[in-house]
Structures are given as structure tokens and as C-alpha cells.
Amino acid sequence: MARDLFVGRGSELARIAGLMAADRGSLLLVDAEPGMGKTALADEAVRRARAEGWTTVWGGCPESEGAPPYWPWIQILRTLGGRQGVLAEAGPDDNRFALFDRVIGELTRAEPVLVVLDDLHWGDPASLRLLQVLAAGLDGHRMLVVGLLRRGAGGEILASIGRERSVHRLTLGGLGQAEIERLAFGRTLDRRLVRSVVERCEGNPFFALELLRLSRDSGELPTELRQVIGRRLDAASESTRRLVRAASVLGREFTLARLAELVEECEETLLDRLDEAVGRELIRESGIHRFRFAHALTCEAAYAELGLAERRRLHGRAADGADGVDTLAHHLRQAGSPDALQVTLKAAEQARARLAYEHAAFQLGQALRLLPEGPQRLEALLELARCEFRSGAVSAAWRSCREAADLARALGDVGSMADAVTVIRGLSNSSAEPLCPEINALCRQVLAVLPDHETVRQAKVLAQQAITSNAFTSGGGTELSERAVSLAEASGDTDARFLAMQARRVELTHPRHVQERLDNGTRAVELGRSTGRDEYRAWGHHWRLDSFWELGLRHELDIEVDHLVEIAAAMREPLETWRLTMVRACLAEIEGRFDDAEALAGEALVIGRRGEHQGADFVHMVVTSRLARLTGRHAEAMERAVREFIAQAPPGAGSWLALQLVASGRRDEAEVFFRESLPLIGAFPPHAPEWMPAVAGVAALCAVFDEHEPAPRLYAGLLPYADREIVSGAATGSEGPISYYLGILARLMGEPATARDHQLQAVERCLRMRSPVWEAMARLELGKAVLAGRDHGYLRTADEQFSKAGELATRLGLPQVLADLAEVARPHGPVLSAREEQVAELVAEGMRNRQIGERLFLSERTIETHVRNIMIKLALETRGQIAKWWAESRERGR
């Protein structure tokens, strides 16, 4: 659609204008069927933006495999006059997100700026990752990015981009009949022809214009768009068709010089030959001696007409003049050249050096098509697995690892088998890691045949075996990580030492090892400092943070958070930002800042998905399900999410669902799951990450359903850790102090004094951790324990705890605590009897016992008994204290 023929799209342009006028940046994804006018809409938006003083830049994603990574961004930076070389400046110590930050910095210098990315469905993965990071950071910038893509032609990365908060979507439908008529009357005044075009084109403006062009040559009009393209190519002379077919080998855009080299003609002659193609609007001039196919479908149709022999010949000719290793590799592969393999491997190496791991993986995949079984294929498979893992494609990386291990076994290369099994990092032995069983099995196979002198590989494989061992069947030993540490330290290999530390952290999950975990984190921090590896420091500080939270040391915990803030800012890696954001969400939760906690957890989920961190959704569910139990918000939605999860979870996980059902008010259904899970609670070994939260959950449910039988067993299991918090990882937060659950169990066991002592300790720990949320719950349970004990002054003491719990629950918004208070605070009746209330009131008025007796027609001895009972119940010693209590109780509305 030429600019002077632009019609319609008023609402779409208004929406773009609205996004430009907003005070925050946006990414608008425009999808449509081919020919609906995506590019024309963007052209018009660019024209209007320029009129308003905006900088506008355009980057196209080529269909050809020969384009280098980041190609659309290189075009954009070149247009802006920026350093497009920034994308080639990555060094071995860089990470991709620091590189992306530099690119985004170049873009933001041009604000306000409109960026158009055409044919986004053909975008290389590295370019799409950069777009995703840009989309996540658009807030606060005057920037609008418009991405144009074919409907239904996205992929996983585009789907992930679509979840960013800054993203808006716009689907272009067909133009209305009146708009198509306006478009058509710009070309012809034949009303009958216009009606025929309107009937056939179904609102597709490109189809409509193509039909009008064909009408000049034939009265018969085709019914499908691809037929239209084919007919228009057929209408050209054979010489022009050959030229257009040859040009299609170069992709949608090409230069006159490249085409002249390809067809072996001088540029002047070629310009004359291009006249017909331009005149028939098969090809358009896009700059000085630069050309572009009028539509991507035209290029596709022309290429499809090439026979195999002609296609190979033309690609061979194109390879002779290729100006980049990616382009050269593409043409050599299509030409069937024996040089294709070596050049493709070089393209992969260059992409990896530029941190374009997805593009490197693509090139390695192409190389594998050319490689026979043998050592070189094995090396390529291992490198493919590493690139896939670095790009976040963990499942694909493991498939490549398995294939590499199978080939290494066939070749008798045990060392490469060991390398294959240690490519995947950052795993845990939790039930949420589906790859662990397969990796662990391969570790055992490798260790059975790995020679003793391979100390570095032995250390790594032992560590990987420890990390991936099933906590439910491993027995809880620490021998594997001990051996891994010993071998790694003896070898001096940095990577082996750190992997052994990770294994140590996993095998030391049991709460009795908390101090060793803390020391292990310290060693990781020191290793990171000595080697300059921020990644090691980050892991070490996270392990220390976990330990300090479990120990209930808030000051030390906050120091670790400060360290992580500094490291995350320096690394700019999604994993570090995700973990830190989750920690902040969990701290906001225990402090009662529930809106902040929900917002931070949601932000973390987006970051985790962007970095393709496999545990992001599970961790988010753990935290938000607990928030739902505390606040009552989204209780039904979280109950459904947990129900879906436990279908694949270990035995005993039904208690989690029972807790969510209680929060949703469905106690009968909750009790069914609770009863079913009770016999299975022993399935969680103490060294499993899930053990302590599982036991705590069952303890809470025992209180809900007044179940006494399991209490002694659960109490005995938790008692050695009475001074701890329940933390299976700082990213999933805390389930409260263990002493809180010990107090609940002790009360169920009929030991109210012990229950009271535990809850007093819980309150103290909550105050130290600055957690009014758990303080409210601990005070509620403390009041219950005091009531059960019926010690001197128990009614007044219980009332004080219930009052404080109620104040906190009201301020924070804890509906379950308030509901429990309504049930338990007064089931014992009033604190004082009606007669004692009368006596207390008269004592407060200053009357003596004799005077009170005369007023109430009771003996002085009887009044003395009432006063003594009042003092016992309220733990008071003087009449003045009774008067003070009475005044305070009136103020509270008693």
C-alpha cells in the first residue's frame, strides 16, 4: 500500500497515538494475516511520529538463515548513528544482560523514539531476547516499540515477551467495504470491477491491490492470495522472472551490487532489467541501489519456483560474494558445498563469542546435519548443549547431553560422557525438578567407568550425583558431597570446587546442618572474591541468607540482602534479580505488607519466566498460596493451582491442599485430604527440603480438626529445632517459628504449660524477626495455651494476648486470625461473673467491703470472697489494681 493510498485504521492509529502520549514506554505487538497492512500501518505511524518530533527507526528481521544475530538491532543502531558495534564487543567475561543494557542505553539516548521491528516472526532468538529485556525496562522511558508479525507465527520467546507488563496487542482485521472501495477507486473508476474486488479480497488491502493490478491483463480474477502472486509473476517476461527468482536467493532485501555479482551482469545493464520488476511492483527501490521485494509473499513465491539445481547454483554464486560468516554459511549449506561444515562451525563460534547463544545453537544444529558419527560430532553436540543451557533451553540442552553421552559411550570416550552429564547446572533435588532422575542415573553410569586419575571430572560427576539424588530415597547421607569436595580441593579446579559446594548445600538440607550450610556459603563467597566470579558470590550469599533466616537472625539476614542487591545490580542476570525479588516479596509478607508482597511476587514471576528459570512458577505458587491463606485473597484460585500441583507431587502433599481449602472455607473437603495425608507424613524424610513445611502444615491442621493422636510424634520430630524458623529456602519465605507449631502440638498433647512456654518463645522470635503477621498468630495460640492451663490470673493473661492478636490482625488484615479469635476468645464465658462485675465496679468507686455488702445486701465475708476471686482471676494484688482494670475494661467497651 503506497502512502497516498492509505485508508482506514483510524482506531489503530489512535491507539498508537495513545501509547505515544503515555508517560511510560510500551511494546505494541501487531499481528495480522499476510497482506492486511501491518507495514502500511507502521509507515503511517512513523510519518505521524516524525511530524510530532519523534525519532523513528526501523529494523527488519530477514527470513533468510544467513543473517547474523541481532541483525534488526544492528540496523536500528546504525540508523541512530549509535555504536552498532556494541553488539560485537562482548568479551568472555560479559553476560548477555549487561550487553543488552548497553544496547538499550544507545536507544534511550534518542528519546522520544518510535522503534519498528518488521517481520518479527522471523526474528532470530538472540534479537527476541534483547527485545524481551527492553520490554521489561520500558517503564519511565518515552519509547514505543512496534513489532509486526504474522498471525499465529510466533514461538515460545514471543509468547514469553507477550507476558511482560509493558506489552500491548493489536490484531489487524480486514478493512471495511467502504475502505476497500476507497482504496480501489484510487486505481480504477470501473464500479463493476471494484465490486468484484471487494467480494474476493475479504478486506485484505494487499489482495485488493493485487487483484486490481491483474485486472489490467486479464478479466478473470483468482480467489486466493498466493494465486494472485503466482499470476503476477507469470505475467512478467521470462527474463524478468529469472531475475526475480535469482534475487529471491538473496532474501527480501538486496543491493544492486550483490544481485549483479549473482547474475554476472554489470550494474547499468541490470538496472534496465529491473525496470519491469519495479514497474510491476514485484520489487521496490528502498534506497540508493537498494531494493526490496514488495511483499514477503512475493519473495517466497519466487524462491519456490526455483528448481533444485538452479537453487544450488545460485546459492553457490551468492556464497562467492557473501559479506559475513552467517550469510556465507547459509549459502554454502544451500549450495551443498563441502566447505559448509567448517564455515557453519565458525559462525557458531562467532555467535557464541557475541553471547548470542540461541543463534550459536542454531548454527551448531545446522552443522550436526552435515556431521557423521565421530569425535567432531560429539564435540559439536556438547557445545550445542552448553549453548542451549546458556540460552535457558534446559530441556533441549539435556536432550543434546543425552545424545552426546550415547555417542561418547559408542566411541569409548568416558571423559566426554562425564562432560555431558555436568552441562546442566543450578538443579535441586526437589520434586519440582523433572530432569534429576535421568541425570542422576547417568552420573552413576559414568562413575562406574571413569578412571581414578580423572580427578576433576570425578569431582564434578560426584557433585552432580549428590545434587540430583532423590531426597526421598537417598538416605540423607553426605558422603557424595564430601568426596566431591575432597577431590575438587585437591585438583584446584575452580569450577569443580564450586560445583562441589553446590552439592554440599543440597546434601546439608537437614536442619541439624544449618551451621555447616552457613560455613559453606562463606566459602563460596570467598571463592567468588578470589576468582572475580560474581556468580559464586551470589550463590554464597543466598546460602548464608537461607541459614540466617532459619536461625531467626534478622540483622544478619538484612546484611546478606544488601550484598545481593549490589551483586544483582552488577550482574544484571535474570536469575539473580528473580531470587532477590522473591526474597523481598517474602520479607514484605512476614512484615504484613501484603500488597507489596503480591506485587513483588508477580514481578519476580515475570523475571523468572523471562530468564526461563524452571522453578519460577512453583516458587511463585508456594508464596502466593501462603499469602492467600493469610489474607483470604485469591483463595479459590490458589486452591485450584495447588490441587493441580499435588496430582504430581510426592505422597503426603495433600496437607498443602487441605490448608488452602481451610482458607477457602471448605473445611469438610479439607478434612478429607487431611485424613488421607496423615498416614503419609512419614514419607517426607527430615533431609528433604519439604520435610519441615510438611510437618508444620500437618501440625496446623491437627489444631483445626482437633486431632490429638499424631501430636506426640510430630512434636518429637520438631523439638530439636525449637529455636529455628521454618525456611526451606529464602526465595519461598517462612512458615513461621518452629516454636509456634511446638506450642500447638503441646496444647493438643494436654501440656498447656509447655505450650505456653513455646508460644512465648515464638512471640519473642517474631519480634526479633520484625514479623507482626506471625506475632499475631503466636499471641492467639499463646492465649489458647494460657486458657488451657487455668493458672493464677489466666483469664486476664489470655484476654491480653487475644486483645493484642486482634489489634495486629485488624491492622494487617488477617481474616483467619480474626475468625479464630471470635471462636476462642470467649468460649469460657465472661472473665468475671455478673456478681463479680458488680463488686469490681463498686471497688472502682472507692467503696469498702462493708459498704459494698450493704449496697448489694450481702455479708461482708461474702464480699471479701468475691474480691479475692477477682484478684485471682485477674492476677491482681490490690484494690487499686482492680479499679484500674475496671476503668481500662470500660474503655475497651466491656
Image: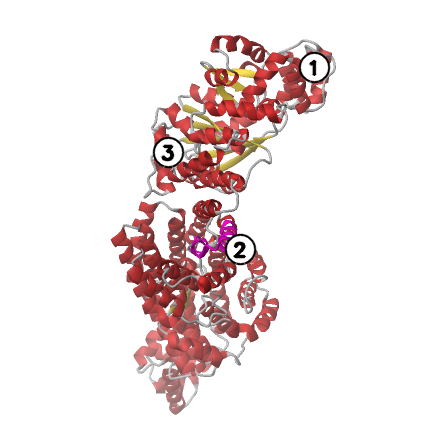
The x, y position of residue 468, in whole percent, is 46, 62
**Residue lying at 32% horizontally and 69% vertically, measured from the top left:** 515
Q: Are marks 3 and 1 in contact (CB under 8 Å)?
A: no
Assess disc 2: are there few (<14), some (14-19) or many (≥20) residues with their C-alpha within 10 Å of its C-alpha. some
Position above or below: 594 against 750: above
Closer mark to the observer between disc 3 and disc 1: 3
Amino acid at dot 3 = Leu
In this view of the protein, can residue 516 be seen by the observer?
A: yes
Residue 421 part of the magenta-drawn span: yes
Q: Position of residue 332 (x, y in %)?
A: 50, 30
Q: Residues within 10 Å of mark 1 (few under 14, many from 20)?
A: many
Q: CA distance from mark 3 to mark 1?
A: 50 Å
Location of residue 11 (image quadrant): top right
- The residue where tag 3 is placed is 87
- Which is more foreground, mark 3 or mark 2? 3
Q: Is residue 792 above or below residue 694?
A: below
Residue 450, compared with residue 247, is above or below; it is below
Looking at the rendered structure, the kind of residue marked 1 is: Val
Q: Which residue is mark 2?
A: 634
What residue lies at 55% left-to-right and 16% top-to-bottom?
Answer: 283
Q: What secondary structure is marked by label 2?
A: loop
Residue annotated with mark 1: 194
Query: Which of the pair 524/410 is nearer the observer?
Result: 410
Magenta region, main secondary structure: helix
Residue 419 among those drawn in magenta? yes
Q: Secondary structure at mark 1?
A: helix
